[in-house]
């Protein structure tokens, strides 16, 4: 059986791939002109990839929010069959629409990724990620079914139930947060079950930053191979890129995306090998084509050919963010969401601190907020009531359960320059 889902495309020669990209780009530019946002640009004058980079401005996440809800829609609404969305920083989320063809192309991309790492008909795929508006759950679900794997849409949490399904149905492939994988192992220990005695062989990990050491630890504990996934909901979700069996860089599928690395400060396009911000242009999306979208992810294009035989560009492990987005157990959020919520609650001061720690292998969000002196010196019941209100409103805004700590006025650091509001301790503990 072939190791390729689409061998002709996955092994396409560079020249032919560039020619195909230009063909797809022209069609994408024609579609993009139908969207209110891109209508202002002279897209019909672009005749080359170099001209595209020189003449088309970047698209940013903030553009998607400011033109909510239909400012980027390039098709008739009657053609739209699905929307997915991520959280917003000012009340508006980033919303992406899909036509039926978009869903089919997305499914094919995820299937290509999963097939590349050895998922085959007859595998049992257990999806421990969230469904709903989050793209990770449904994206991998459809990809697994397209391959022909028996798919268990179990969703997150309930660790002992996860293990029960793994035991009884012979789960072989698992989609899981890396931090949750380590936490799940503690439940195996509690139940005195050796995960290596099960049928597990492939873990798909992603949706949150993790080190190479964490990946290797997961592989050793479970007796599996763990592969990194890359995707973002704005351009489809999972399936944008994936590691192959070599585990040496993430292949980005260039028949679907035009890939650039830019200097995040100047916007200059950087050559392969230099680290910068990843910029993607969608080449096949119908409902919401995106041109030169700044992902915010810092990486570099890896030089050389991959021994797997695939010719599509590889990027290095994501090194961080060019913006201030935080990822907490796979949930994307921004510090400004926290600030907006805190400042909208009477009695809360203007100084606060965000701390992120790793506890029992999972991310834990701590919010330290100064409160008015009268409240701080008031009754315990009053403090508890305010603490609970802050926690409830932050939970509703962030979809993350924070630990709220109320502080006396003047007790948190004051910064003369740009305030350092975030203290991420996950890699130092």
Image: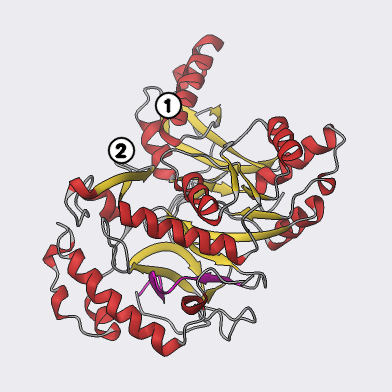
Q: Quadrant of residue 250?
A: bottom right
Which residue extends farthest bottom? 15
According to the image, label 1 marks what residue? 393
Q: Is residue 336 rendered to the left or right of residue 217?
A: left
According to the image, label 2 marks what residue? 91
Magenta residues, as a range? Answer: 249-266
On the image, the x and y values in percent for residue 221 come to 81, 51
Numbered circle sitting on residue 288: none
Tell me: residue 227, above or below residue 191: below
On the image, the x and y values in percent for residue 108 come to 45, 60
On the image, the x and y values in percent for residue 320 come to 53, 61
- Residue 426 visible in the snapshot: no
Report the front residue among 312 and 186: 312
Q: Quadrant of residue 191?
A: top right
Judging from the image, what secondary structure is the residue with disc 2 in? loop
Mark 2, other Cα within 10 Å: few <14 / some 14–19 / many ≥20: few
- Residue 304 visible in the snapshot: yes
Which residue is pictured at 64% across the width and 70% down the height?
1
């Amino acid at each position: 059986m072939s190791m390729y889902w689409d061998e002709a495309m996955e092994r396409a020669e560079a020249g032919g791939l560039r020619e195909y990209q230009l063909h797809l780009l022209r069609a994408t530019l024609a579609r993009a002109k139908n969207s209110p946002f891109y209508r202002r640009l002279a897209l019909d004058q672009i005749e080359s990839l170099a001209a595209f980079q020189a003449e088309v401005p970047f698209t940013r996440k903030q553009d998607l929010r400011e033109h909510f809800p239909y400012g980027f829609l390039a098709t008739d609404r009657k053609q739209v069959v699905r929307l997915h969305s991520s959280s917003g920083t000012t009340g508006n989320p980033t919303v992406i629409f899909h036509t039926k063809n978009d869903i089919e192309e997305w499914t094919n991309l995820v299937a290509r990724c999963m097939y590349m790492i050895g998922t085959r008909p007859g595998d049992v795929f257990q999806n421990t990620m969230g469904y709903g508006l989050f793209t990770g759950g449904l994206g991998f679900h459809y990809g697994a079914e397209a391959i022909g794997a028996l798919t268990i849409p179990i969703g997150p949490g309930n660790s002992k139930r996860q293990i029960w399904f793994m035991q009884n149905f012979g789960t072989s492939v698992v989609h899981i947060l890396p931090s949750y994988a380590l936490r799940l192992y503690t439940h195996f220990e509690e139940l005195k079950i050796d995960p290596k005695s099960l049928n597990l062989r492939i873990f798909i990990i992603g949706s949150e930053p993790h080190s190479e050491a964490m990946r290797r630890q997961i592989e050793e504990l479970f007796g599996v191979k763990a592969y990194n996934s890359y995707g973002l909901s704005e351009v489809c979700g999972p399936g944008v890129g994936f590691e192959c069996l070599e585990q040496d860089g993430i292949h980005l599928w260039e028949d679907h995306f035009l890939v650039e690395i830019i200097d995040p400060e100047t916007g200059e396009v950087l050559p392969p090998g230099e680290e910068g911000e990843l910029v993607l242009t969608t080449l096949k999306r119908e409902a919401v084509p995106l041109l030169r979208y700044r992902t915010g992810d810092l990486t570099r294009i890896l030089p050389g050919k991959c021994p797997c035989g695939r010719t599509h560009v590889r990027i290095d492990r994501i090194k961080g963010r060019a913006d201030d987005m935080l990822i907490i157990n796979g949930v994307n959020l921004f510090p400004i969401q926290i600030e907006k919520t805190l400042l909208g609650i009477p009695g809360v001061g203007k100084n606060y601190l965000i701390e992120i720690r790793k506890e029992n292998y999972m991310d834990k969000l701590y919010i330290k907020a100064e409160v008015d002196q009268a409240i701080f010196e008031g009754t315990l019941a009053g403090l508890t009531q305010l603490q609970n209100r802050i926690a409830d409103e932050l939970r509703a805004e962030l979809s993350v359960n924070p630990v709220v700590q109320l502080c006396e006025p003047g007790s948190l650091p004051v910064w003369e320059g740009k305030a350092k509001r975030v203290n991420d301790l996950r890699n130092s503990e």
